[in-house]
Amino acid sequence: MKATILLAHGSSDANWCAPFFELEKSLLQSVSNSHNVKLAFMELSSPSIADAVAELSAKGCSNIEILPLFFAAGRHLREDVPKMLAEIEQTYKEQNTPLTLELKPPIGQSQAMVDALKNTIENAL
Amino acid sequence: MKATILLAHGSSDANWCAPFFELEKSLLQSVSNSHNVKLAFMELSSPSIADAVAELSAKGCSNIEILPLFFAAGRHLREDVPKMLAEIEQTYKEQNTPLTLELKPPIGQSQAMVDALKNTIENAL
């Protein structure tokens, strides 16, 4: 089964996290049942990436894409997150339930999002 | 003259900042000359909000909107940034060059951006 983790930065502030849970809820209503989508936070908030992977693995998902809900890729996405993903993969390998975690480019850098951002700002000016 | 500061979080990582400078450049080519648009960073990167305000004020702008390039409003946008803006306003008031800085909601929470994000994720799934 295909699975995607939507990865947000995370914050100790629940107000910051709320829109991401809204987005997850909205997406769960529109995607097919055969595709598992799960929100996770890199730090400070729950569920963590490891929590989300555990839930998806328990459902039988072993190919999981990580789609970062970030505007841009900095050190977090180039260093911290790849390290976290490698550690999680290693854990599952040692448990004889191997899985692959594929980190995608940040959503904010997709052409559709760059265009939408530009249009929205132009309209706001 | 109208002026808008596009406010990004900022990062010590130049790779993270680069797409925001690209966005600023692209917007400067599409908006009218009578509307000043300037990128600024909340922390860790230059120009700061104070730098951007100084440049816009020198051009004669005294009504400046601050448009946060954030997905969601957490403590930064509810506490830190309003405090920064109030301090800057106070400084200009004391210099007898008063100006108003209006903080707008985060761009990521505009309906157009929420819709674009949802569509882009659905296409990426």
Image (cartoon, coloured by chain):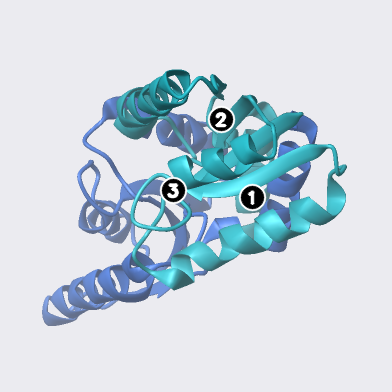
Chain colours: A cyan, B blue
Marks 1/2: CA distance?
Answer: 18 Å
Marks 1,3: beta carbons within 8 A: no
> Which chain does tag 1 point to?
A
Residue drawn at the location 20% of the way across and 44% of the way down: B44
Q: Quadrant of the C terminus of chain B?
A: top right
In the image, which is nearer the foreground, mark 3 or mark 2?
3
Dot 1 falls on a residue whose secondary structure is: helix
Which quadrant of the figure has residue A81?
Answer: top left
Which quadrant of the figure has residue B102?
Answer: bottom left
Closer to the chain start, of discs 1 and 3, is 3
Closer to the chain start, of discs 1 and 2, is 2
- In the image, what residue type sits under mark 3? Ser
Which quadrant of the figure has residue B90?
Answer: bottom left
Instruction: Categorize mark 2 by other alpha carbons within 10 Å: few (<14), some (14-19), many (20+).
Output: some
Dot 3 falls on a residue whose secondary structure is: loop
Q: Which residue is mark 3?
A: A48
Q: Which residue is mark 2?
A: A109
